[in-house]
Amino acid sequence: MARWLGVRSSRRDRNGSLGGGEPPIDRALLAEIERIRAEAREELDELKDVLRHRARAVADREAELDRTSRHLDRRAKRLARQRSGLREEARRRSRLRERFADRRERLEAEELAPREERLDERERELELRERALTEREATLESPAKPDPA
């Protein structure tokens, strides 16, 4: 009755026939199909191996990049600490330079002050001498006038 309704049986008989009058499946065709399937499985296995190898290479490269990244991060931190240390050292040297410059100026001032005083005193003496000489010249050049007193 299933044959009359057009329903096919899912079971094959001994000859590979599906029943219902279909011709039996050719054994050579089945062998060819199995051979093609086997080749496809082999090729698929090879491709899977290639993909596993590439995935392993990618994972190794990522691990190497992670190690390099961590190394560079540590180096950057070390350099930042060194740079901040260098900045601090530069600030300290600048403060020392300022302190010693102030001290040097003060010492120079203390050392130069007596010299400047002596030079000022000498300048005043020279001005007094010059004034005395100009007065003397003036008295010598002017004709002697009788003193009215």
Image (cartoon, rainbow, N blue to C red):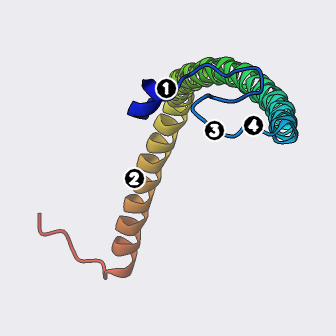
**Identity, as a three-letter code, of the amino acid under mark 2:** Leu
Q: Earlier in the sequence, mark 2 or mark 4?
A: 4
Q: Position of residue 25 (x, y in %)?
A: 75, 37
Q: Quickly name the residue at label 2.
A: 128
Kind of element beneath mark 1: helix
Mark 1–mark 3 distance (CA, rounded to whole Å): 115 Å
Q: Earlier in the sequence, mark 4 or mark 1?
A: 4
**Callouts 2 and 3 close, C-beta under 8 Å:** no
**Callouts 3 and 4 close, C-beta under 8 Å:** no
**Identity, as a three-letter code, of the amino acid under mark 3:** Glu
Kind of element beneath mark 4: loop
Label 3 environment density (alpha carbons within 10 Å; few <14, some 14–19, many ≥20): few
Asked if residue 114 lies left or right of residue 136, the reply is: right
Nearer the observer, disc 1 or disc 2? 1
Q: Quickly name the residue at label 3.
A: 22
Q: Quickly name the residue at label 1.
A: 102
**Identity, as a three-letter code, of the amino acid under mark 1:** Asp
Nearer the observer, disc 1 or disc 3? 3
What's the mark number on residue 25? 4
Asked if residue 60 lies left or right of residue 146, the reply is: right
Mark 2–mark 3 distance (CA, rounded to whole Å): 149 Å
Mark 4–mark 1 distance (CA, rounded to whole Å): 111 Å
**Callouts 4 and 1 close, C-beta under 8 Å:** no
Q: Earlier in the sequence, mark 1 or mark 2?
A: 1
Instruction: State which quarter of the image contains the C terminus.
Output: bottom left
Instruction: State which quarter of the image contains the N terminus.
Output: top left
**The image quarter in which residue 17 lies:** top right
Name which residue lies at 30% across and 77% down.
144
**Identity, as a three-letter code, of the amino acid under mark 4:** Ile
Label 2 environment density (alpha carbons within 10 Å; few <14, some 14–19, many ≥20): few
Kind of element beneath mark 2: helix
Image position of 29 with respect to 60: above or below:
below
